[in-house]
Amino acid sequence: MNALTEDQTGRGGRPANGTATTVENPPHTAVPRQTAPPSPATTDPAPSTTASKEPAPSATTSEESASSATATATADPAPSATTSEEPAPSATHPEKLASSATASEEPAPPSPVTGRPAPHSPITAVTTELAHRTTDTDVFPARWTRISDTRFRFTAHWPAVHPFFGPVDDRHQDPMIVGETLRQASMVLAHAEFGAPADTHFVMWDLTVHVDPAALLLADAAEPVEFDVVCSEIRRRGSGLRSMRTTMEFRRAGRFVARGTGSTGCTSPRAYRRLRAGKLNALDTPVPLLAGIPPRAAGRSRAEDVVLAPADRPGVWNLRVDTGHPVLFPRPNDHVPGMVLFEAARQAATAASGLRPFLPDTLTAEFAQYAELHSPCRIETEVFDERPGEVTVRVSGRQDGASVFTASLTSARPARVRSLS
């Protein structure tokens, strides 16, 4: 990969698998709150859907995790396991993050599910800072409106073409875009609605997504996606946020597409530095960039998007970490982001099952600890044919003898077409 450009990192370019691996981005100038002019992207409120409540999975997962031991010892809960999402770089107060704030004072239309009208609430545009992304093309939620203190209605756009979340075949969009949208929307609400400061480090301890692949069609990509969000298990720290669960249901043109849930924890920079002191203070060393498996085996079209490298036996791979990847590593980081681990699970399920494409209708992940950059991480799989016409792949990541994450992905097997000859 080429070096990251300045607009991808928010700083000078950095070569892939180079030496600058820090999670503390220098703060940018605070973005002042301003009223966005009316536009098609901000004045057409999204119709509601009723978010169905998923059972709360165990608290261990994907964006950055909170180490329970450290959380007990400090006032701020420390992420226990996974992928730190970078603190949003452009502001120091959550209210300043919503730079494209009130765009319309018209109420959203009635929900197509409940028929009840939405309250009179402004529509707020999602910014790259709120979603913790560095480019607009990587931000999938577009705008939201408040329904109540714990319910919100979003509109998202899932493009037909994207540098990473592109189509998996000539008919279907990537189901992984659902989990990424859930992750981004959770951080948006944590900042803009629940008071998480701009420099917060986030942890998504668990993530569960159910998708109807037949509703995730490339032909419908121009149609916006509406989703309702229910926030629960809200725990405060003063006026800010300590943790919460978000449950979302996604519809496109009124048709169910997916539902998902995840629990998110928030850690202050000071607590994060205490938790990660040994890693943050260590001398930088280059991350070995391993040769990947063939893209087709991983279900990808480009070699640079492969996150698996060959290992010593079938069904097992080594994690391939490319710190110069502009989507998976938009900023320097001191550990492997959860998005990389989630993608490793999907690629491992594809390679282990042999399905092309592997279109998961159920994806779950739990994260136990951070995946470090400078130690080999093994990705192991087990394939189960538990139900006729389905295949389930259980994936685990292990590093230095300890579990990093576990995941389970289930996909329908394509029906066999009998020859009439």
Image (cartoon, helix red, strand yellow):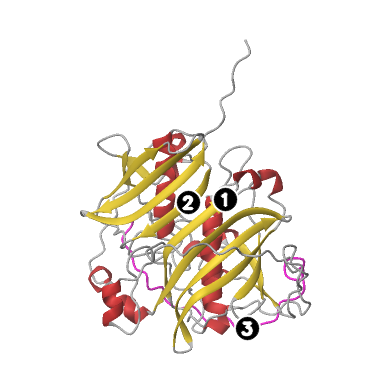
Residue at image point 66% right, 71% down: 144
- Asked whether, in this view, residue 61 is left or right of residue 37, the answer is left
Q: How many marks?
A: 3
Q: Is residue 161 above or below residue 299?
A: below
- Asked whether, in this view, residue 239 is left or right of residue 279, the answer is right
Q: Is residue 171 above or below residue 258?
A: above
Q: Nearer the viewer, mark 2 or mark 3?
A: 2
Secondary structure found at label 2: strand
Q: Which mark is residue 190?
A: none
Q: Which residues are magenta?
A: 17-44
Q: Are marks 1 and 2 in contact (CB under 8 Å)?
A: yes
Residue type of the residue flagged with mark 3 = Arg
Residue 108 lies in quadrant:
bottom right
Q: Nearer the viewer, mark 1 or mark 3?
A: 1
Residue at image point 44% right, 57% down: 339
Q: Residue furthest top?
A: 421
- Asked whether, in this view, residue 121 is left or right of residue 407, the answer is right
Q: Is residue 42 magenta?
A: yes
Q: Is residue 200 magenta?
A: no
Residue 110 shows in this picture: yes
Residue at image point 43% right, 53% down: 342
Q: Earlier in the sequence, mark 2 or mark 3?
A: 3
Q: Which residue is mark 1?
A: 211
Q: Which residue is mark 3?
A: 33
Q: Nearer the viewer, residue 131 or 7?
A: 131
Marks 1 and 3, how far apart in space? 36 Å
Marks 1 and 2, how far apart in space? 8 Å
Across and down, in percent, residue 195 comes to: 51, 83
Residue type of the residue flagged with mark 2 = Leu
Q: Which residue is mark 2?
A: 363
Residue at image point 41% right, 42% down: 393
